Image: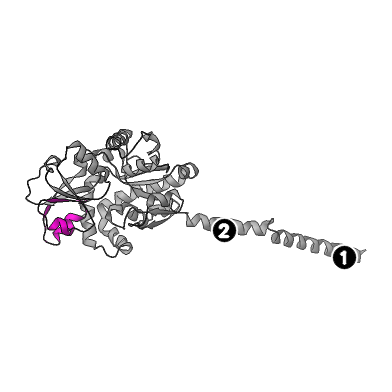
Amino acid sequence: MMKNTKLWMTACLIFAMLAVTACGNNGNGNVAATGSNEEEAEAADAGTSVRLLEGWFSKGEDGGYFAALQQNYYKDSGIDMTIQPGGPEVSAMQMVASGKAEFGISYADEILKAREQGIPVVGILAGFQSTPQVLIYHKGEKINGFEDLNDKTVYIGTAVPYWEFIKNKYKLSKVQEMKYTGQLINFINNKNALNQGYITNEPYALAQQGIDVDVLKIADSGYANYADVLFTTEDYIKEHPEVVKAVVQASQKGWSYYLENYKTVNPLIQTYNPDMTLEAMDYEAEHQKEFIMTDETAANGIGHMTGERWEELLEQMLEVKFLTKTQDVSQAFTTEFLAKP
């Protein structure tokens, strides 16, 4: 009897061990489940991976996003952020629309144009309340406003919306347009000329060569553009609203930090663009503040946008035929993810 009892107990023990081993091996038991939870925990720690494509080479004008990266605002919000520089051969619109990047940086007028072309992008944060673009002219020239540009030479790019708006509004039928090649030598040699540029860039570069200039701010023309607009797609917003919210609000915090601490962030930006000096980036940071912090953003938070501004911009673009048909601007932007001050 004792011998049979021992045999029965041994058989039960062997059966139990086989059962546990089998459960672990086929992925349905406790052993496999524990491994799965560990992998999920590691993935959660890494955060949701997203890519932000800049509109141009890395610079201080995108400083808020780099500050959010450096200060771990993205990471703390569960976002594994990669910032990728743009350039002349890179289209942020196309990259985001194709899913090769989740977020991009552009202008409000480019978003409206893209939507007319069937690219469903949506602005989610306006880094700049107005554009830092300018027309530069030689210091001492008798130019008090855009109405004084008739009989002047203007070096400008092809199909520039703000320029078409300015020509139409100020009746500049006698202005001489010349193709801007990206080089300032023609402007330097022509005292009667103006050149497109950014208040954050060309005045500094020219000053390094001993050339003093003044500027006409495109924002003062009445062109209602938002600049440095963070955007994504309609589908990404629908499928990943929490990710969009996390990116937007971390970016707002980044901009707040960068405004006062840009000298600690610019060395990081320089690693993405070694050709740009820290002094040039510091100049950018100082001269762009007025476009980021306004009465509007003081009341509503960095990145704020209004339907009225988008509607005004739409009408301006229709007037100069940069858009061929009207559209619902409420679909072109959203402020639902912005944190309020």
- The quarter in which the N terminus is drawn is bottom right
Closest to the camera, between mark 1 and mark 2, is 2
Disc 1 marks which amino acid?
Leu
Crowd around label 1: few <14 · some 14–19 · many ≥20 (10 Å):
few
Circle 1 residue: 7
Q: Residue at x 80, y 61 (%)?
A: 15
> Which of 243 and 167 lies nearest the eye of the viewer?
167
What's the colour scheme?
one colour
Residue 307's spot in the image, x, y percent?
Answer: 33, 34
Above or below residue 234? Residue 270 is below
| Number of numbered discs on residues | 2
1 vs 154, left or right, is right
Q: Describe the element under mark 1 as helix, strand or loop.
A: helix
Disc 2 marks which amino acid?
Glu
Q: Residue at x 52, y 56 (%)?
A: 43
| Residues rendered magenta in the picture | 185-213
Q: Describe the element under mark 2 as helix, strand or loop.
A: helix
**Residue 87 is a magenta residue:** no
> Which of 151 and 62 lies nearest the eye of the viewer?
151
Circle 2 residue: 39
Image quarter of residue 322: top left
Residue 320's spot in the image, x, y percent?
Answer: 27, 37
